[in-house]
Amino acid sequence: MSATPDSPVSTALLTDRYELTMLDAALHDGTASRRCVFELFSRRLSGGRRFGVVAGSGRLLSLLRDFRFGDDQLRFLRDARAVDAQTLAYLANWRFTGTITGYREGELYFPGSPILTVEGAFAEAVVLETLALSVLNHDSAVATAAARMSIAAGERPLAEMGSRRAGEHSAVAAARAAYIAGFGATSNLEAGRRWGIPTMGTAAHAWTLLHDTEEMAFRAQIEALGLDTTLLIDTYDIRQGVETAIRVAGTGLGGVRIDSGDLPIVAAEVRAQLDGLGATGTRITVTSDLDEYAIAALAASPVDAYGVGTSVVTGSGTPTAGLVYKLVARQDAAGSWIAVAKASADKASKGGRKSAFRTLDGGTATSETIVVADGFEHAPAAHDDARALQTVFVEEGDIVTAFEGAGGVAAARTHHAAVREELPVRALGLSRSDPAIPTVWVDQD
């Protein structure tokens, strides 16, 4: 089997060493086989955001499929003296046979939301901590930022174009997350191939600089790509660029792109010039270090589309969602379930298996209701008239394939668009604030 960037032959070492040292010790003291429930959640919304967007679950499932300790991985662990011979023998046959449930990709989350619940033997579940967190922390941060930009853009389309501002593999993941949360296209070709995301792109300033004149560059681009192409008009003088573009292409030119200047002023001037030249149907796309605030500031400007780079792939100033992965319930030596929780100051967790529901009033979300199971064996599947938020991703080791691949991405995008309609109006604000809806905790009767 050959490796691919998002799914190498083995993902087992995409982890922290302490997960394997805990496993090593658990095998020695006999606790490795204890049934446990781990939970991935957020104590608070990073960056003062009013909601979060779940992304990365489908990627995690594919990476879990390749979580195997082959000869290379075992040799490295042996040479590094990370674990002993007994643990190496155990890892050689490691397979996840437990169950994973969680929020669908594209779903909204709030403080305390049990975004992912992993149940299995301690030896199976503990080693997934870093992989789960690295995927969901990155992707959810990007998706949350992208959703805010999508809200600010309204009906105007957004394109993700930030690959040059991220690691080569995280760039592909970021394009995926942004698409789920409302962006309509990406400049990243691998994201298009792997996830079925529409791709876009025409020319950079280098294209204009390559030619002896701006006019020669425009003519060559139109000859190659047709009149519906978008010409980059700010390499030299913007007003002259508009005049040259229409002289070369005529009033049927598809679009122009502005990548510099005071965008509200420049966009208005370009629109007026285009209209004055008769190019009333020529679209204006703006780029130039946009984020949700800059997009909101352009709401009244004659802009037709946005291209966003650095801001979206870095979470718009919040590059991680701040999610954590904690043990919340376990069996004792007699097989009875016990709720466990961390009590550290400012880092406390809430023990017990959880079921989560979105309480609605007339189709508008009013609270995140989390029911804590009494006996831990069976968390409630329904609560009043609220919408259940959790679904099964892995059942007794079998991965539900519907959440993977391009099909999973398309479904997540559709789901996000639907659940975002449930947000109350106050959730649409961009300023730092409390979560848009409260989290209500309910102990199971």
Image (cartoon, helix red, strand yellow):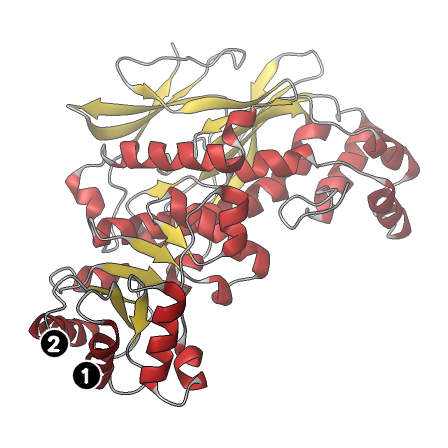
Residue at image position (51%, 55%) is 189
Residue that carries the numbered disc 1 in the rendered image:
239
Other residues around mark 2 within 10 Å, as few (<14) / some (14–19) / many (≥20): some
| Residue 187 % position (x, y) | 44, 59
Instruction: Let me know if residue 434 appears in the view.
Output: yes
Q: Residue furthest bottom?
A: 212
| Residue 437 % position (x, y) | 25, 36
Residue 140, compared with residue 391, is above or below; it is: below
Q: Secondary structure at mark 1?
A: helix
**Kind of residue at badge 2:** Gln
Residue that carries the numbered disc 2 in the rendered image:
273
Residue at image position (51%, 63%) is 166
Residue 15, compared with residue 162, is above or below; it is: above
Residue 433, compared with residue 389, is above or below; it is: below
What is the quadrant of residue 216 in the picture? bottom left
| Residue 43 % position (x, y) | 42, 41
